[in-house]
Structure formats: C-alpha cells, structure tokens
Image (spheres, rainbow, N blue to C red):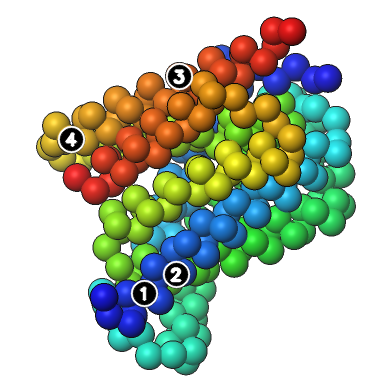
Amino acid sequence: MKEGQVFILGLIVFTGLCDTFRELFLKSGVNSLDEVSPDNIKQVTLFIFKLIRTPRVWISLFFGFLSLFIWLFILSKVDLNFAFSLDSMHYIFIAFAAQFLLKEKVRRMRWVGTLLIVLGITLVTLS
Amino acid sequence: MLKRKVTLKIFLFLVLADVLETFHQFCFKKSALFKKDPPLTGAYDLLVFFEVVFSSPFFWIGLLALIMMFILWSTILSKIDLSVAVPIASFSYILVALVSILFLHETITLLRWVGIFLILTGVIVVSVSSCERERP
C-alpha cells in the first residue's frame, strides 16, 4: 500500500467516526425536546427553532460539515464503490454508540438486522 | 416513556429523507468530481479543491437539499430510536439500485441482487425490532 492510500483509508475511518458523532449529538439534542409529527408544519417549525438553540446540535453540525468536506475530498481521490463500501461500517459504530451512550435497547434482533445491512451494502457497492 | 414504534408514515418520511440524501450526494459529487485524480500533495491542494467546489451551482442546490433533509431527519429522530432510524435509512441503497435499473438501464449482477436482498431483509428485521420494544 502506498502512503497516499493509507492516508485516504484513515480519512474514510475518520469520516465514519464524524458521522457517528454527528448522529449522536443530534439525537441527544432532539431527545431533550418534545416529540413532533413530521407532517405538522407548525409543530416542525417550532421544533426546529428550539432545536437550533440547543448547543448539542451545533456540535452535531460541526461534525456533519467536517465529515462532508472530507468525504467530498475522498470522492475526488478514490473509486466511489470502495469508499462507499467502507463507509457502511459506520452503521456498526452507530449501533454501539446508541446502546452505550444513548442507552437505547439494541437487542439481538436489531444487531442481526444491522449486520445484514452492512453485509448487503458491501455486496452492492463492491460488485 | 415515549412510543418509539416505526409506523408506515414514519417509514415513508424516512424514504423521503433518503431521496433528499441521495439527491444531495449526487449534487455534491457533481461539484467535487471536476477532474479525475488530481495529485495529492498538501494543504494547498485542499484550498484549490474547496475553491472549485464552492463555485459550483451543484454544491448550493445540494446544500439546500441537505438543509431540508436535516429538518426532516431531526423530526423523525424525535419519534424513533437512532439505532432504528440509521439502519432503515440504508433503504437509499435500494433506491439507487432501482433508479439505475429503471432509468440508466444498468445490468445488475447476481451478487448485487443478493446484496439488495440482504439490505431489504435487514431493514425489515430492524423495523420489526422497534415494535418488539413495546412489549413489557
């Protein structure tokens, strides 16, 4: 492996971690507010105004943009399929993080589903 | 404790968020793939890269789709677990495959069909697992 490839590989793992942090902080911010229906425009507007005043959401946005720009950079350097198949591992990061940090109950069945998806994405993107 | 079950309505909103996600990815890719394989030498390259990206209209259309997706995604997260929403969002891979079959007339290899089937099964299993939590 060339030095550039190791660098790109590291960047892909790094964006996976950034995506995980983005979702974690967003979910944690959303959890501090009341539940809303996505089809109730009035509720959603109020919800978004409350949400953007939550500091956790800004941390989430920071990680989101960081991952986005690095991702764009990766896409201009390597084969798309390769990048996407490696990106599927962030589903596993999310499942762990949701279980241990957000205290969601990720039982065996949800793990099986998540792993099927990761395997499926690997097959779809690599073939 | 809030109800966190995935209803058909939530599922359809997730699919809509997926369509927006796919569209914004497409736009961003269009703005980033301006030339194939530029040399990777250092920080200056990164600056040039971002300059090109920001000057592309695709980037700004993609950003608009991204904002809409953020709003939709946050409201969905207020209803269901993160460990359910994220796996179900992988439905976008199936959407992309469908688009390439129907509109781009791409041939799908057997291995790819197996992958699509696995994703679909996984999405169903995860959705069902969110309903199971309701039981005491």
**Residue A3 falls in which quadrant of the image?**
bottom left
Residue type beneath disc 4? Leu
Count the marks: how many?
4
For label 1, the residue is A6
The numbered mark at residue B124 is 3
Q: Earlier in the sequence, mark 4 or mark 3?
A: 4
User: Residue B40: image x %, image y %?
Assistant: 35, 85
Q: Left of A47 or right of it: where is B59?
A: left
Label 1: state its secondary structure.
helix
Picture layout, residue A115 above or below residue A84: above
Q: Check the residue under mark 4 and report the chain it is in.
A: B
For label 4, the residue is B111
**Residue A8 falls in which quadrant of the image?**
bottom left
Residue type beneath disc 3? Ile
Residue type beneath disc 2? Gly
Q: CA distance from mark 2 to mark 1?
A: 6 Å
Label 4: state its secondary structure.
helix
Q: CA distance from mark 4 to mark 3?
A: 20 Å
